[in-house]
């Protein structure tokens, strides 16, 4: 004969289960940093749900995949918010990890930015497509428009992880703030009028960190810190670009420009990157230091390479690094640029002829590195954030 619990025992057990569930939920929220979780199933109106959220609390918007979320209004993330898809996989492209999200957010034609971040936010495991460039009445392009992610009001403690941004008119990310880990940026600056303005995979005017990321096939610069690249207390290594695969971008793969002469000008540390096949649209080299000060470029690899089964050409005209000064009086003078320990593989450095106080070069003639044999489609499953 079955033994049934008494009424009191049943209530006690129910209370225990509720407590356990509460502890688990609170623990998850603590780990994620948000105050609560809102699940957004496929087929729901993502922009309406996010933009109607309570601004006084941080919310993790958990998307369900695989599916596409079309948006016709900018998705605005506020202080403490997180936007996340289900964890996907990576393709290893040494030294980068190419993310393969299973959810895509697509902005409608005419939407100036697909997602905008304000305050400290986190975005992970989503693909963002779109961003329409807009123009002022005099016909000049408008700054901050035409990007998949606009971060002009974001904090320097914001972060992106395993995010793919593509298909924008100007930049993948405008006014970038924070840390960018294992992201992919490609096919940006579809409107050539934004070249030389904001056209890039990512553009910042303050120090940011980009690591283990796949930056490729952008019509403008790959990664660009410009207009003083202001100091960030959260980024002690400055504009820190390291362990990335930066390839086949139309202008410089990595550009540090117009930095110096003001008290809060930033610094650059560009190291341990694979840089190949860049600057086909304008000869700026794989790495470009232009009218800028206090930059260290070290231990990067240039020249032809085969990585993860993909062959890359040398950077345009065989120029690995350019350290240049325009001579324009309104811009900072080139100064205190150190270039050391890079593997050139037949490419050259422009600027070493400058006096040592301006540019110091110390390159070791190392033999070419062995061809990487990473399988071309080696998906790496992910078991956590």
Image (cartoon, grey):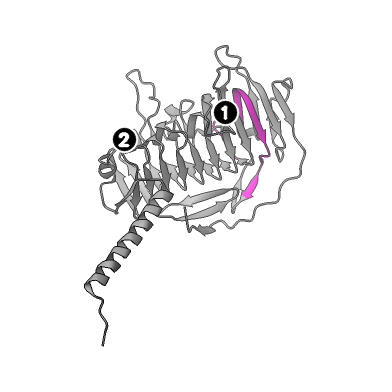
Q: Give the CA distance from mark 1 to mark 2.
A: 29 Å
Residue at 36% x, 55% y is 25
Q: Which residue is mark 1?
A: 256
Q: Position of residue 269 (x, y in %)?
A: 62, 33
Q: Which residue is mark 2?
A: 111
The stretch in magenta equals 277-306
Residue 296 drawn above or below residue 35: above
Label 2 CA crowd tier, 10 Å (few <14, some 14–19, many 20+): many
| Direction from residue 225 to residue 44 in the image, left or right | left
Name of the residue lying farthest toward the front: 8
Residue at 37% x, 45% y is 34
Q: Position of residue 136 (x, y in %)?
A: 34, 21
Q: Are marks 1 and 2 in contact (CB under 8 Å)?
A: no
* SS under mark 2: loop
Task: Decide which of 30, 131 is in the foreground and name it.
Answer: 30
Q: Position of residue 290 (x, y in %)?
A: 60, 24
| Direction from residue 378 to residue 147 in the image, left or right | left
| Direction from residue 189 to residue 340 in the image, left or right | right
Q: Position of residue 54 (x, y in %)?
A: 27, 40
Residue at 57% x, 31% y is 238
């Amino acid at each position: 004969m079955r033994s049934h619990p008494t009424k009191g025992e049943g209530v006690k057990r129910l209370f225990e289960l509720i407590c356990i569930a509460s502890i688990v939920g609170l623990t998850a929220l603590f780990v994620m940093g948000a105050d609560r979780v809102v699940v957004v199933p496929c087929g729901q109106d993502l922009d309406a749900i996010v933009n109607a959220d309570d601004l006084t609390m941080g919310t993790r918007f958990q998307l369900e995949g695989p599916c596409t979320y079309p948006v016709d209004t900018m998705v605005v993330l506020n202080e403490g918010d997180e936007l996340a898809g289900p964890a996907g996989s990576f393709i290893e492209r040494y030294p980068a990890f190419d993310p393969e999200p299973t959810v895509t957010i697509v902005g409608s034609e005419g939407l100036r930015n697909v997602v905008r971040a304000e305050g400290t936010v986190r975005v992970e495991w989503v693909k963002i497509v779109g961003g329409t460039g807009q123009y002022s009445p005099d016909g000049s392009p408008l700054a901050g428009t035409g990007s998949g992610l606009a971060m002009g009001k974001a904090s320097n403690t914001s972060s992106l992880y395993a995010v793919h941004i593509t298909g924008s008119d100007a930049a993948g990310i405008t006014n970038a703030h924070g840390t960018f880990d294992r992201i992919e940026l490609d096919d940006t600056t579809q409107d050539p009028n934004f070249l030389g303005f904001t056209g890039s995979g990512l553009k910042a005017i303050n120090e940011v960190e980009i690591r283990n990321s796949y930056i490729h096939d952008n019509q403008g610069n790959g990664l660009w810190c410009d207009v003083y690249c202001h100091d960030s207390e959260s980024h002690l290594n400055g504009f820190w670009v390291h362990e990335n695969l930066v390839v086949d971008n139309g202008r410089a793969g990595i550009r540090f420009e117009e930095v110096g002469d003001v008290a809060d000008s930033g610094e650059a540390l560009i190291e341990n990157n694979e840089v190949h096949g860049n600057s086909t649209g304008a000869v700026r080299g794989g790495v470009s230091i232009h009218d800028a000060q206090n930059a260290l470029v070290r231990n990067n690899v240039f020249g032809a390479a085969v990585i993860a089964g993909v062959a890359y050409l040398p950077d345009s005209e065989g120029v690995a690094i350019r350290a240049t000064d325009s001579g324009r009086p309104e811009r900072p003078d080139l100064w205190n640029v150190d270039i050391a320990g890079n593997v050139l593989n037949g490419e050259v450095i422009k600027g070493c002829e400058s006096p040592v106080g301006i540019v110091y070069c110390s390159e070791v003639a190392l033999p070419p590195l062995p061809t990487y044999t990473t399988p071309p489609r080696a998906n790496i499953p992910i078991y956590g954030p």
